[in-house]
Amino acid sequence: MMSAHVPPFQASVPYDGLPPLPPPAHVTDSIPVLRREAEARQALAELKGVANIIPNQAILINAIALREAKDSSEIENIVTTQDRLYGAVAASSAATVDASTKEVVRYRSALRIGEALARDHGFLSVNHVIRIQTEIIGNSAGLRATPGTALVNDRTGEVVYTPPQDPDIIRRLLSNFADYYNGDAGSLADMAVLHYQFETIHPFSDGNGRTGRILNVLYLILKGYLDIPILYPSSYIIEHKDEYYRFLRAVTVAGEWEPWILFMLDAIQATSVDTIARVREIRDELDRTIDEIRTALPRIYTKELVETLFVHPYSKIEFLVNALGVERKAASRYLRSLEELGLLASKKIGREKIYVNVRLMTILSRETAA
């Protein structure tokens, strides 16, 4: 049903009439939305609890955030592999890293910056959003200041959407977005509304999708759904990419909010369930690795050693030196012993030797069951 608040839509005309938030009251409290919201909240609550079974939370944050960096960037056709991504994080020289992988690594850095801003301030301002986007794209262009931006169908060249073009309108809408994000919004349905609003404002020339998806997980932390950033629906969106864009556009064209919100709630629930399973697998593998090293290599076993191999699935001498406070010769000997035991596999990246936690990477690389 067309909302009275939605102006007539023309794809080639700047959408300067985008209604500010909040949305109409019926948008987030329909019976189907409330039911799906309850299911998604339950899955998130279980994930929040399960995350605590990993003693060192950096293991989850590093592992899952890197996967999200890869998946979220892939939605924007920035494609790399898990192997290249972890290799880039471990490598000392940027010369060994391809351009797409560098972009994905910047996304992970933007996630960390956004989390720090959210925790330090308890909210995210417009300037904070700009800071996150700046890290993603690697320049300080800021908000769009010149007209000419339009979203085009890659196959046909047809303009499918023209966002607001006037810088004053963009800033006003983004300020309204931030006010609602930090204020009255609190439900998961609100998160879906906010994600639509941000993508429709399209405040930047580049990086809008990736920035918007970072804002989603930071919302979950700020509103208390999660303690750490470990829920990312990007893998679900990749599997249902056509639906994602169709439902997103249907809100703009016809005011059809419910299918969009239900889609995003499904994404939260499905991704939560998958992440719960993955966290449990990581914990089982952590325990198994502890037992194997303690039994076969008791002289080098420490809790810190094992955790380092899980915080850094692609490890190297420097990581052990810093984490364990041992000399390079000792760290090198530890890694070689672990490789002989079959827990690690060495590979060359540039001139460096990197040691891969093979079984952990199998868990992290497994496709999401969407």
Image (cartoon, grey):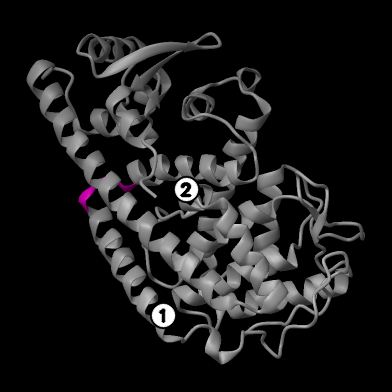
- Label 1 sits on residue: 32
Q: At which x and y percent is residue 289?
A: 18, 28
- Dot 1 amino acid type: Pro
Residue at 53%, 72% (x, y): give it.
Answer: 259
Q: For the residues carrying marks 2 and 1, which lies nearer the camera in this image? A: 1
> Which residue, given by chain and number where applicable, does mark 2 sit on?
235
Judging from the image, what secondary structure is the residue with disc 2 in?
Answer: helix
Q: Residue at x 58, y 77 (%)?
A: 257
Extent of the magenta region: 53-57
The structure residue drawn at horizontal position 42% and vertical position 64%, both measured from the top left corner, is 266
Residue 3 in the image: x percent, y percent? 67, 87
- Foreground residue, 300 or 161? 161
Q: Position of residue 218 (x, y in %)?
A: 50, 62
Q: Is residue 174 visible?
A: yes
Within-10-Å neighbours for mark 1: few <14, some 14–19, many 20+ = few
* Discs 2, 1 touching: Cβ within 8 Å: no
Say whether residue 56 is magenta. Answer: yes
Q: Nearer the N terminus, badge 2 or badge 1?
A: 1
